[in-house]
Each structure stands twice: as C-alpha cells, then as structure tokens.
Amino acid sequence: MIKAILTDIEGTITRISFVKDILFPYAAKHLPKFVEQHQHVPEVAAQLHEVKHLIAKPTASTSEAIDALLNWIKNDEKVTPLKQLQGLIWQAGYENGDFTGHIYPDAFEFLNAQYTAKLNLYVYSSGSVKAQKLLFEYSDYGDIRPLFNAYFDTKVGGKKEAQSYLNIVEQLPYLASEILFLSDIVEELDAAKSAGLATLQLWRDGQTQSAAHPIITDFNQYTSNN
C-alpha cells in the first residue's frame, strides 16, 4: 500500500522547457556578475570553494571558477555547487517577477488531491532544495510549498543511483515499498525500483519508455493501481 509519494520536478510536474529555456539561460546570463558581486558572501564563497575542489585547482581565480560553472551549465552537468548558485540567482529572478514557476495543471490538481487525501508528498530533484522551494513558492498557482513534507537534492546522491533512494528512505517513516516515485526518466525509475520503491513514469515529451515501469501521459490517468 502506497503511503507517500516522492516526485521528480522537471518533465514530471513541470515542463522541461521551463528549466531549459527559461531558468538555465537566466542563470547563465546573470551568473558571472552575480558571483563577482557576491563572492565574499559566505554562502557563495562556500560554493566557489567546492568548484575549485572539483576542478582540482584550489588556488583558481574567481574567473576560472566562473568559466567552470558556465561550462557545466552548457553541458547540463548535475553538479551540486552549480545547482546551489543557480538557486540563489533564480531567487532574484522570482522576486523581481522575471518569471513564475511553471506547474502542469494536471500535476497541480493531482498534488492537491493527494494532499487532501492525507498522502505525504516529497520532492527529489537534481535542482537544489533552494531552487525547488523557489519554484513552488512563486508557482503559477501561488505558494504551494505547504503541499510538501520535505525536499531532497543531489546531496543525497545522484538520481540514477539506487543508493540515493535508500538514503531518502532512511530519512522517511516508511518502507521503500510504501513510497511511489514519479519521474519521466527511465534510469531514475530503474534506480528507485532497485531500491525497492514503487515507480510510475510520466511520459510527456517523447522520452525513452520502459516496460519495467507503469506509464501515464498525464495525471488525469492516475489511479492507485498504476
């Protein structure tokens, strides 16, 4: 029996193009100036330190760190310090009204229905927890953060690694089999299934499908038997 839902964001409850066509370009455009202006702020300085560690250049200049960050954006790398900095940059964009967080209408209805049914909702995304909360705080439907019990990002591990889902299960009051993981990415679903979670693929943008997981094209097709 499913007692909780763990959901991906991009491609599952929000369209992929929102992240790729709006959020990523916004961060890339504003990142150099943001980092230069805030490099001595502890939260930013900590991420820059991690960037230098990851590129194996502990004495790298701020300019070199920025180049590495921009290269990671270009290659769509799921690197934790990049995600943390993107979250800080997007915060300014949301607060300035430059964009709102896209949520599919069927996803909004589904999340509300599960919340009303007292099913606990959790989020696991490669975007930082900060970025997740911003998207939900400034969503198309207003602040929907109260729908969710907790948020997880790559600090628990990569989304295509079974251990990451085991790490999440350890933090929740449920057995793995009592948690349903929602995603559009087969490799993520495979990892979650390997960890013992139930899985369901949202097939919205022509992604790869797998017979190993139930599939729906929108949440209007969802039933507890999926």
Image (tube, grey):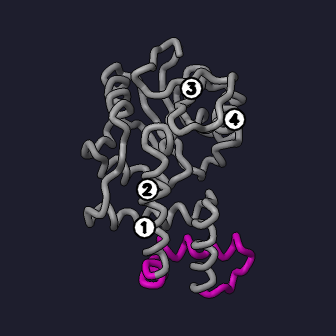
Cβ atoms under marks 2 and 1 closer than 8 Å: no
Cβ atoms under marks 4 and 1 closer than 8 Å: no
Neighbour class for label 4 at 10 Å: few (<14), some, many (≥20)? many
Picture coordinates of residue 126 (x, y %)? Answer: 56, 50
Looking at the image, is mark 4 or mark 1 nearer the viewer? 1
Is residue 72 located in the magenta-colored stretch of the structure? Answer: no
Among numbered discs 2 and 1, the one appearing first in the sequence: 1
Residue at figure coordinates x 52%, y 31% from the top left: 202
Mark 3 residue type:
Leu
Q: Which mark is residue 200?
A: 3
Among numbered discs 2 and 3, the one appearing first in the sequence: 2
Task: Left or right? Give the position of 183 relative to 106.
Answer: right
Q: Say which residue label 4 marks.
A: 191
The range drawn in magenta is 33-61
Among numbered discs 3 and 4, the one appearing first in the sequence: 4
Image height of 122 relative to 92, above or below = above
Q: Say which residue label 1 marks.
A: 26
Q: Say which residue label 2 marks.
A: 130
Q: Which mark is residue 39?
A: none
Residue at figure coordinates x 37%, y 38% from the top left: 104
In this view, the residue in front, 159 or 221, is 221
Task: Left or right? Give the position of 33 relative to 176.
Answer: left
